[in-house]
Image (tube, grey):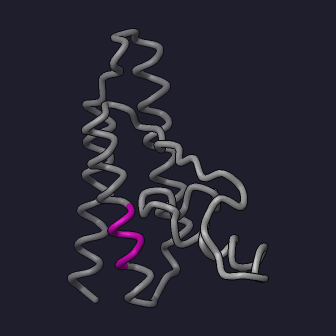
Amino acid sequence: MLSTRSTVLSLYMRVFRIARAWQAQTGIAADTESERKYILQEARTLFRQNQQLTDQESIKRCIEECEARIEIGLHYKNPYPRATHLPPMGLATQKGRKLRVQQRLRKQAKPVYLQSHDET
C-alpha cells in the first residue's frame, strides 16, 4: 500500500512539474497557457476522481493510464488525448450477437490512455 501511495504521489508531482515547464508547439503564449491549464485541470480531476479506489488492480490500471498519457503527451508535444477511430459495428463478431458484443469489443479495443477520458 505504501509503495502504491508513493507511486501515485510521484506521478501527481511529475504531472505538475511537466505542466510548469510545458511549452506549446506553436510557441504562442496563449496556447502554452491554455495547454498548461488543461494539464493541471485534467490531473486534478482524474486524481480526485480516483482517490477513493482501494482495489489494487484498478489502481494499477490508473497508474498505467497516467504513465501512458504522460509519455504520449511528451512524445507528441500535445497534452490532449489522441483520438481513436473505431467505426460503429466495425469489429468482427460471431453470428447473431451484434450490439452487446460490439459494445464489449469497443470497450476492450479502447487504448489504455483513454480509459478515463469518457468518464470525465
Q: Nearer the viewer, residue 9 or 101?
A: 101
Quadrant assignment, res 58: bottom left
Q: Nearer the viewer, residue 44 or 77?
A: 77
Image height of 120 relative to 17, above or below: below
Q: From the image, which quarter does the C terminus lie in? A: bottom right
Image height of 88 relative to 107, above or below: above
Q: Left or right: where does residue 22 sit relative to residue 47?
A: left
Image height of 18 relative to 89, above or below: above
Image height of 95 relative to 106, above or below: below
Q: Magenta stretch: residue 11 in it?
A: no
Q: Position of residue 4 (x, y in %)?
A: 27, 80
- Residue at figure coordinates x 60%, y 53% from the top left: 86
Secondary structure mostly seen in magenta is helix
Q: Residue furthest front?
A: 95
- Residue at figure coordinates x 23%, y 62% from the top left: 10
Quadrant assignment, res 106: bottom right
Q: Left or right: where does residue 54 sit relative to residue 7?
A: right
Q: From the image, which quarter does the N terminus lie in? A: bottom left
Q: Position of residue 46 (x, y in %)?
A: 51, 60
Q: Nearer the viewer, residue 99 or 9?
A: 99
Highlighted magenta segment, given as a residue range: 60-65
Q: Position of residue 88 (x, y in %)?
A: 71, 56
- Residue at figure coordinates x 78%, y 73% from the top left: 99
Q: Left or right: where does residue 21 sit relative to residue 35?
A: left
